[in-house]
């Protein structure tokens, strides 16, 4: 038995972890942020897959039976390969889940105009994962995707509240809404972006619903655990949360409080050296 693993390239997955804890506080969680190698958003398919695979193995080695890729870029570029190619030999009784499908499952039911905008990293947009999932789940929904390559570096470096940072953010929002003025729902398709939610809401027209993924993913995990007792019974329940980062621990602890509302005391982990 072990905690539920939650993985992100950096701090963004903490926004998901916050909602997982709100919804399912009884479980133990082990968060891993690969801050030393973030951002993932502009990296190639192969590199994101390799980094994500290393993180999943680390979490498995530390006792997790279930790992959530709380990162859209990793979900878009690595999830399928890990599920289909790696898990059957590496750990047939363990599971890895992503954040794109649960979000695509609900987004079509939120929009009234049927026009949805997705803001995400370059990697997620280029993978076309949201478009493909929505085509299957809600084919009548029209989706416009827009990559915001500056947003994660701005957030990771704490520059998103500066005037220059806000200018980049406004420019991307304008570009998305120019592509389709009928958009009434914007999905924040990167787990870093909820930290900008308030600012985005204050900038876009009031009729636009800005949706972040945390509550959606938490709802979907609760449902998954109910449907999969064989996985659920391997998840420990002492309400503990532990944190790992591949970067400097003090920096992580300080910055993590922006994304997570309890004090964070992380341990350092070396990724990328063990599995070569
Ligand atoms: N937070 C991640 C996502 O949801 C990745 C951001 C990045 O590392 O570029 O896509």
Image (cartoon, grey):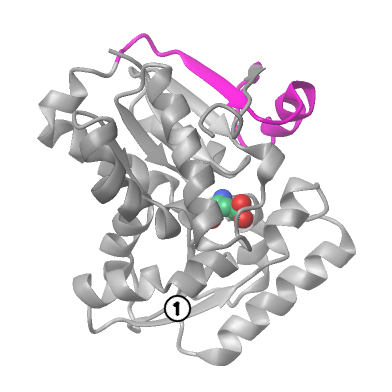
Q: Residue at x 55, y 26 (%)?
A: 274
Where on the picture, by quarter, is residue 250? top right
Residue 262 rendering spot, x and y as whole percentages: 60, 22
Q: Is residue 51 visible in the rendered structure shown here?
A: yes
Q: Residue furthest front?
A: 276
Where on the picture, by quarter, is residue 34? top right
Residue 250 is covered by the magenta coloring: yes
Decide if residue 253 is on the left or right side of residue 191: right
Residue 206 rendering spot, x and y as whole percentages: 56, 73
Q: Secondary structure at mark 1?
A: loop
Which quadrant is the N terminus positioned in?
top left
**Magenta highlight range:** 236-265
Against 188, residue 28 (above or below) is: above
Q: Could you say which is closer to the camera, residue 193 or residue 246?
A: 246
Where on the picture, by quarter, is residue 151? bottom right
Q: Which residue is mark 1?
A: 184
């Amino acid at each position: 038995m072990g905690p539920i693993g939650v993985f992100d390239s950096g701090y963004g997955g903490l926004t998901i972890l916050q909602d997982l804890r709100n919804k399912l506080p009884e479980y133990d969680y082990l968060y891993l942020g690969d801050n030393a190698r973030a951002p993932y958003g502009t990296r190639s398919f192969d590199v994101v897959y390799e980094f994500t695979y290393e993180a999943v193995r680390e979490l498995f080695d530390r006792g997790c039976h279930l790992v959530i890729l709380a990162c859209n870029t990793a979900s878009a570029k690595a999830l399928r390969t890990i599920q289909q190619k790696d898990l059957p030999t590496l750990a047939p009784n363990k599971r890895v889940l992503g954040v794109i499908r649960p979000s695509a499952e609900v987004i079509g039911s939120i929009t009234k105009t049927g026009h949805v905008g997705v803001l995400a990293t370059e990697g997620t947009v280029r993978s076309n994962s949201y478009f493909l999932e929505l085509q299957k789940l809600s084919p009548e929904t029209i989706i416009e995707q827009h990559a915001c390559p500056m947003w994660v570096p701005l957030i990771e470096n704490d520059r998103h509240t500066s005037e220059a940072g806000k200018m980049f953010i406004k420019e991307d929002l304008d570009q998305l809404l120019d592509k389709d003025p009928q958009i009434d729902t914007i999905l924040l398709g990167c787990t870093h972006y909820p930290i900008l939610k308030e600012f985005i809401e204050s900038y876009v027209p009031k009729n636009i619903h800005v949706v972040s993924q945390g509550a959606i993913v938490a709802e979907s995990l609760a449902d998954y655990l109910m449907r999969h007792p064989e996985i659920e019974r391997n998840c420990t329940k002492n309400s503990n949360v532990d944190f790992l980062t591949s970067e400097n621990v003090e920096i992580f602890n300080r910055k993590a409080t922006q994304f997570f509302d309890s004090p964070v005391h992380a341990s350092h982990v070396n990724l990328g050296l063990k599995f070569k």
